[in-house]
Amino acid sequence: MKSLLLLFMGLSLSFSLNAQRVISGVVSDAAGTLIGATVQVKGTSYGTITDVDGSFSLRLPENARTLVVTYIGYATQEVVVGESNTLNITLQDDAQALSEIVVVGSRGAGRTKLESAVPIDVLDVSKLLATAPQTNLNQMLNYVAPSFTSNTQTISDGTDHIDPASLRGLGPDQVLVLINGKRRHSSSLVNVNGTFGRGNVGTDLNAIPASSIKRIEVLRDGAAAQYGSDAIAGVINLILKDDVDKLTATFSTGAYVSEGSNFLTGGMDGESYDLGLNYGLPLGKKGGFVNFTGNFEHRNWTSRMEELTGQIFSVYNGIERLARENNIDPSRMSIDDIRTLAPGLGYLTSDQLDFIQNMPEDSLRKSSISPLASNATDGELAARGLERTDFNMRIG
């Protein structure tokens, strides 16, 4: 009886091991093995992923007949389990499936994927160049990306050229800019003069021609855990063009037409021009290429001021002009130099000349009573070939 029991237990164990056999194998594509491919028993939660060699090993439950193999960018494949315990599976590319994947730094393409963990905008630059009334990258992003902000600065030193860019209202130094998934260096300019992002050093987006960009991916949320503290505001990834044997040219222009233009005289001002050329050449036989982009941009000045009134030049400014014309350093002029040069100002009256020649030195240097502080704007404008509108504030 004891022998029969042991025989029955042995047969049961053998049957159980046969029912839950182990399947192993390798998952690959045309180029080689695939790391992280999912191998799952169809209709169940049993599964595994391939290791660094593309290998997998999976214990099959009873009655399992089909494996489902999946990998991002490849067509899902169902494999029927046969008698062999070894399977070598080759997956095929699926470009359509890949186009639905959007990850900043990847090659996915789409528009806005709100089903992702955080919202991501994917912007087609070729369409923006054709339809958006903007000329540079900052303005384009400001036009279409809801979380992006960049405004043209004025009277702000170098910040007038390098417009600070912001995501979600945070500082320019908290926006990470990538080019083809690689970090772009920041500029060396510290924003000053009370501009947005004062004290920050950001990335000069306008140094990258829009004509060289294929698409833009904007991650609209913080990504510091993945990229570091410079991605607290979000990430902007610029994917450059990879076209070859194709010449692309873009030209755009625009201006302001208003009654307030040209110092309130009306008409047009603020004209802008942008010309971009792009061409690519193939390199080698394995898909290599070099892509060239040239860009010319011009922005003319804009004014919404009336003609400047009040004093612009004093008599002393006129004497300084004469000193430079006579190779005298204005910062080193003596009282004798001033008295010698003053008669050269043809717009001075005889009384003003007498005051300058005869006034004591101490009084002549006191601006509140000195004739050198007198208004000489009209005479100096004529002598210098200028107009009052030349001193109006201009933007651009």
Image (cartoon, helix red, strand yellow):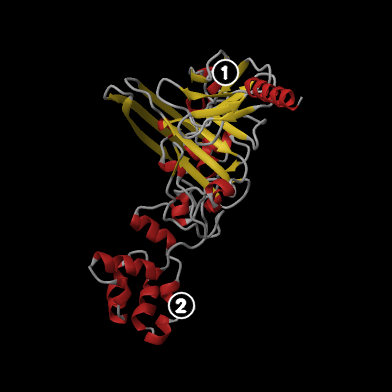
Residue 357 seen in this snapshot: yes
Circle 2: residue type:
Ser
Q: Residue at x 34, y 56 (%)?
A: 384
Q: Nearer the viewer, mark 1 or mark 2?
A: 1
At 38% across and 71% down in the image, what residue appears?
316
Marks 1,2: beta carbons within 8 A: no
Quadrant, the N terminus: top right
With respect to residue 58, does 137 lie above or below? Answer: below
Count residues near mark 1 (Cα–Cα under 10 Å), then give few for <14, some for 14-19, many for 20+.
some
Q: Residues within 10 Å of mark 2 (few under 14, many from 20)?
A: few
Which amino acid type is marked by label 1? Answer: Thr
Between 264 and 38, which is closer to the camera in this rendering? 38
- Rendered view: 140 above or below 151: above
Which residue extends farthest right?
1
Note whether residue 90 is visible: no
Provide residue 171's location: percent of width, then percent of height.
Answer: 57, 53
Q: Position of residue 325 (x, y in %)?
A: 25, 64
Mark 1 and mark 2 lie on one chain; the one further toward the N terminus is 1
Front residue of 388/238: it is 238
Marks 1 and 2 sit apart, C-alpha to C-alpha, by: 87 Å
Relative depth, front residue between 52 and 180 = 52
Quick one: SS at disc 2? loop
Residue linked to disc 1 = 76
User: Does dot 1 land on a helix, a strand or a loop?
Assistant: loop
291 or 190: nearer the viewer: 291
Residue at the spot of label 2: 367
Q: Which disc is residue 184 wearing? A: none
| Spot occupied by residue 84 in the image (x, y as percentages of width and height) | 52, 16
Which residue is rendered at x = 46% and y = 77% of the image? Answer: 367
Relative to 257, is 312 on the left or the right?
A: left
